[in-house]
Image (spheres, coloured by chain):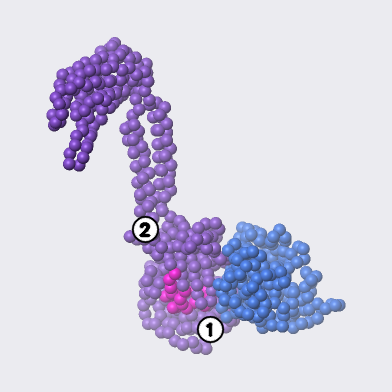
Amino acid sequence: MPPEPPEDPPSSDDRPNPWGEASGEELVEAVTGATSERTVLPSESDSAPAAEQFNCPNCGGSIEIKAAGYSVSIVCQYCGSTLDITNPDVSIIQRYEGEVRKLELPLGSRGELRGVEWEVIGYQRRSENGSYPWDEYLLFNPYEGYRYLDTDGRGWSFGQQLTASPEKKSLLGFEVDGEFYEPFYAQTRAQVDYVLGEFYWRVEVGEEALTADFVRPGKMLSWERSAKETVWTLTELLEPNEITDAFGIEPPRGGGLPLPHQPSPYRKKAGQFMKLALAVGAALLIITALFGGTSDPQTTRINLATNGVEQMAKIGPITLERPRQAVTVSAQAPGIENSWVDLTYTLTNNDTGEIFEANNVVERYSGRDAEGNWSEGSSYTTSKFSMIPAGTYELNVYAAGSRWTGSQYGSSSNAQVEVTIEKGATFYSNLFLALLVVFIPALWQWWKHLSFESRRRSDSDFAGDDDD
Amino acid sequence: MIFQSPALPARICDYCHSTVKRIAEGVELAGEVAVLPFDVSPIQIGTRGEYAGMHFDVIGRIRLAYDQGAWNDWLCLFSDMTHGWLSESDGQFQMVRERPLSEIRSKLVGRLVAGDTVQIGERTQIDGAEFVVADARKATCVAAEGELPFAPETGWEVFNVDLRDAEGFSANFEAEEDEDPAFYMGRYVTLAELNPKNLRAIHGWKMPDYAA
C-alpha cells in the first residue's frame, strides 16, 4: 500500500528532477524528544508481514520500513527529517522542514533487474565536494539483500557490496574473481549532499568517505573507507534498455565523455574486422603465390648503340594454353651508364593477328656533385601483360638507345639489352592494393576504438602517455 | 517442549519466551528473554539447507545489536549433529563453525585472546590465507529464540571481530566477560548456494526459484 502523504503533499511537479535544488523554507532544528511507535503491517495471507509502519514524529506522514531488522535510519520522504529506527520507538535525529526532492526512481518503486525484483528504498545524492554529483539508489529484496543503482546522467550502474576483500595484483590494480581492474580514479573525498529513505547505516548529510575506483570494460570496482569500515563494491554498467525495462523511466541521456567503465563500442568490431582482414590477406598471399610465378623463359639479345637508332628482335613462338594468361617480359641492360633504352614490345597472335603492346625503359645515370657520388635508375625492368587469350604468339622487341646529353663523358657507345619473355606473372601491386582495401576498414575501426579509449581515459587520474 | 539437538543445553519457549535449561533429570527455568523485534529475514527456525555436503536445520537464533545496527546469528544443526552459525548481517550471510583457538596460529588472534583491541584493516595469516579485519565492535544480545548452546540473557554483551580474505572466507573472534573467547571460521555464502528449503514466505515478495 502506498504511504499516505501528510497534510502538505510533496511538489506536484511530476517531472523527476534529481539534479534540481530543493526549494522552499529549510529549517533544521536540534533533536527533540518526539517519538513514534512502530507497528507491523498485517499480512493478508499466511506469509510473514513485509513491512512496519509508523508516523513521522516530525510531520506525521505515514512511513513504511521495508527492510525491518536491517534498517538503522530513515529520512522521511515528506519532511526530510532524519529518524532513528533502531528502537521500537522511532525518534528524530535531525528535524528538517522543507520541500523534498522528487526522485527519478521514487521510493517504493519496484523493478526486475537481471532476473530479480528490487524495491527502491533509499536515495543519496553524493559528490566530490559539490562537484561531479551522482545519484545513488539503495535497492532491497529480502531474499537477495541489497544492491545499488548509480547514475550521473550518462548511464546506470548496478552494484553489489563485496564480501571478499579484493587482492592487490600489481602496483595499483586489483583482482576480483580472476579479473583485473586497472586504477581509474585516485583516492578522493566523497560527501553526501542529500538523502531520502531508509538505510542499513546511519545516514547523514555531509557524511564523508574516501573513495577510489578501478575499472575493466563494463565493470567498476569501488573502494570506500569511512571512519568505521572499508567497503568494496562491484558495479556493472547496465544497458540503457535494462533500466527502462525495469523501472519504466527514460533511458540515460548519455553525451559527454564515455563512462570510466564503458566498454568501447568499436572494440569488438575492430577485432572482427582485423581478423577478417588477416584471413583475407593470408588467402590473397596464398593465391598470389599459387597462381603467380612464371615459366618457360625465352631470351634474346639486342646489340645497339646509344645513338637513337631503333633495333628490332623477335622472340618466340610462345604458346599459351590457358584461356587467359599473363605474360611477363623483362629487360636487362647491365652495361649501360648515363644512357637509356626505350623498349616497345608487341605481342602478336600468330593465328588471329591480334596485337598487344607495351612500352618500357631501362636507364641508369651516375655522376658526382657537391654532395658526392650519386646514381639513379635501374638497368632492369619488367612489363606484364595480363589476360592474354590462349594461342601461339611472337614477341617483337624494338629497342632504341640514347645517351644522356648532360653527361660529361664520351659520345655514342655500345650497349647490350637482354630481353626475356615468360608465361605467367606475379602481380604484387595488385596484391598490395587488395591488402590495402581489406585492411583499411579494420584500421579505421581500430582508430575509432583507440580514440574512444583515449577519451574514456582522459578523465582518469592514471591516464598514461595517451592522455591529453 | 522438544529439543532437536541432544547436545544443546538451552531452549527458549516459543510461547512465553522463557529460557529452559536442561539439567540431569529434566529441565529448569533459567529466565526470560525479550521478544524478537519484527524483521524481514528470509530465514526462520525450520529452514533447511546444505553446506559443505551436509544437510542442516536452523534450530535457534540470537539477535545482536550495536549502535550502528543489528544482526542475526542462526544456529544450524548439521546432519552429523555438529553445529554451525549462519550469520546474517545487512543482507549478507556467512556460515561459520567453531575452531579451537589452540589451532589458530595468528599473532593478531593471539593479541585478541590477550584482550587487546585491533584496528579495521589490520592483516594476519590464518591457515595460510591472508585475512583482513573488516569489523570490530561490542554488541549486545537483544533477543533469542529456539535451541541454543547456552542460556541467553537479554543484555549479555559480546566483543566481536570479523575477518575476511580475498576468496570470500571469513573468520570471527568472540569474547564475552567471564567466558573463554571463541573462534569461528567459514565463508560468505549466498542463500542460493545453500539450496535452502522452507525459507520464510514474506508478503508481497516472490519466493526465489532456488528455494521453491
The disc label shown at residue B104, or none: none
Residue A54 is situated, as x and y percent measured from the top left of the image, at 54, 79
Residue linked to disc 2: A465
Q: Is residue A17 visible?
A: no
The disc label shown at residue A91, or none: 1
Residue at image coords 19%, 29% = A338
Q: Nearer the viewer, residue A245 or B104?
A: B104
From what the image shows, is residue A38 above or below residue B184? below
Q: In which quarter of the image is residue A409?
A: top left
On screen, residue B127 versus residue A288, left or right, reads right
Q: Which of A155 and A292 is in front in this view?
A: A292
Residue A288 is situated, as x and y percent measured from the top left of the image, at 39, 29
Residue type at numbered disc 1: Ser
- In the figure, the blue chain has which letter? B
Q: What stretch is highlighted in magenta?
A: A187-209
Residue type at numbered disc 2: Asp
Identify the residue at the far right of this view: B25
Residue at image coords 24%, 23% = A358
Mark earlier in primary sequence (1, 2): 1
Identify the residue at the far top of this view: A351
Q: Is the magenta stretch mostly helix, strand or loop?
A: strand
Classed neighbour count for the residue bearing mark 2: other residues with Cα under 10 Å, few (<14), some (14–19), many (≥20)? few
Q: Which of A82 and A134 is in front in this view?
A: A134
Residue at image coords 70%, 63% = B48
Q: Chain A is drawn in which colour?
A: purple
